[in-house]
């Protein structure tokens, strides 16, 4: 399953790696792709992810998940 989220505040590769690390640590996540320019974070997972868990992971990385 693949889901794309919008994240604000990312400006560089370091930002992308922070989001990849935090979201990638969620149970069931197999891949996280980040496009800093558009703010798109595409997550591949075995099962649908709880948006609250994704929001918390993005917050931990220092950024904001757009509803």
Image: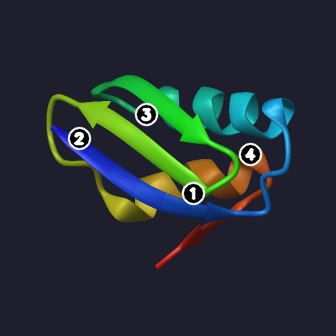
Question: Nearer the N terminus, badge 1 or badge 3?
Answer: 3
| Quadrant of the drawing holding the N terminus | top left
- The answer to whether residue 1 is left or right of residue 12 is left
Residues marked 4 and 1 touching at CB (< 8 Å): no
CA–CA distance in space, label 4 to label 3? 13 Å
Secondary structure beneath dot 2 equals strand
Residues marked 2 and 4 touching at CB (< 8 Å): no
Circle 1 residue: 56
Secondary structure beneath dot 4 equals helix
Circle 3 residue: 26
Question: Nearer the N terminus, badge 2 or badge 4?
Answer: 2
Q: How many marks?
A: 4
- Look at 62% across and 52% down and name the residue there: 58
Circle 4 residue: 61
- Look at 60% across and 31% down and name the residue there: 20
- Look at 69% across and 51% down and name the residue there: 37
Question: Nearer the N terminus, badge 2 or badge 1?
Answer: 2
Secondary structure beneath dot 3 equals loop
Q: Which mark is residue 2?
A: 2
- Look at 46% across and 30% down and name the residue there: 32
CA–CA distance in space, label 4 to label 1? 9 Å
**Nearer to us: label 4 or label 1:** 4
Residue 10, position as x, y percentages in the image: 78, 53
- The answer to whether residue 28 is left or right of residue 51 is left
């Amino acid at each position: 399953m693949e889901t794309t989220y919008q994240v604000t505040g990312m400006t560089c590769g370091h930002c992308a790696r922070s989001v990849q690390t935090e979201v990638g640590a969620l149970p069931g996540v197999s891949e996280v792709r980040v496009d800093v320019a558009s703010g798109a974070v595409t997550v591949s997972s075995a099962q649908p992810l709880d948006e609250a868990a994704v929001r918390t992971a993005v917050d931990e990385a220092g950024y904001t998940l757009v509803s």
